[in-house]
Image (spheres, rainbow, N blue to C red):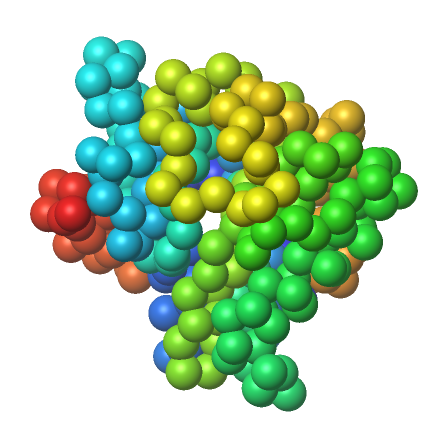
Amino acid sequence: MYCLNLTLPTPAENLALDEALLDAAEAGEIDGEVLRLWEPTAPCVVVGSSSRVTDEVRLEHCRAQGIPVLRRCSGGAAIVTAPGCLMYALVLSLAGRPYARAVDQAHRLVLRQLAQALRPFAHVVCQGTSDLACEDRKISGNSLRIRRSHLLYHGTLLYAFDCSLLGACLQMPPRMPAYRRGRDHTEFVRNLAIGRNHLVQALVQAWNASRELPEWPRARTTTLVQEKYSQVGWNFRF
């Protein structure tokens, strides 16, 4: 598997690159699977592809604080990302994994691998539909998009994140896993007690991402930013 450890300057570029990697794999422009790692330099709210922004985001606060709100290409509810939140994306081939076309099986495939990789540092378990948790509190939320021959699986891993941003920027989610038990954001979410370097190393080893991706899809990323991720019509379409 290839590894791409790359944070682009803007939230729109970073979201676009995840989708561009999927598109490039579908087009046969990447001859293998990819693990991408990145981390924002400032807070950003990212809503799911079908999220209703006004139902999930505290827009007045975000606007007052200059926190951008963007929409990703995958499903799920709104998240906040910021420094201390490692973002990862996997582009995986469905060849040899026909079972991963089923959403629940795709979640199981990736989350079990991640949980196993993190257990030397903490007792991490799979919870709900697409969460990882430690001591009954969420440390990772994830979402996916399945295409014809590949899937994009991406999410968050909290290690030094300001959890107060969640309550400030987000409403209570419209759907909650049973293990949340109605807890507010700060009571429900926590950081892993692990340094960033160890976290990156654990992910790279878990997916055997030993090769550096020689070229990332710059043109596709630029086009997606211009036509999609910088457009109000995409980011606020519901």
Quadrant of the rendered image containing residue 194:
top right
**Which residue is rendered at x = 42% and y = 45% of the image?**
175
Residue 31's image quarter? bottom right
Between 141 and 209, the one lying in front of the other is: 141
Question: Image check: 179 left or right of 217?
Answer: right
Identify whether 233 is placed above or below 53.
Answer: below
Q: In the image, residue 37 lies at what x, y percent? A: 57, 46
- Going by the image, does 208 lie left or right of 22? right
Is residue 126 shown left or right of residue 215? right
Q: Residue furthest left?
A: 233
From the image, which quarter does the N terminus lie in? bottom right
Residue 73, position as x, y percentages in the image? 33, 57
Q: Residue at x 69, y 52 (%)?
A: 126
Snapshot quadrant of residue 193: top right
Residue 36 appears in the figure: no
Between 208 and 139, which is closer to the camera in this rendering?
A: 139
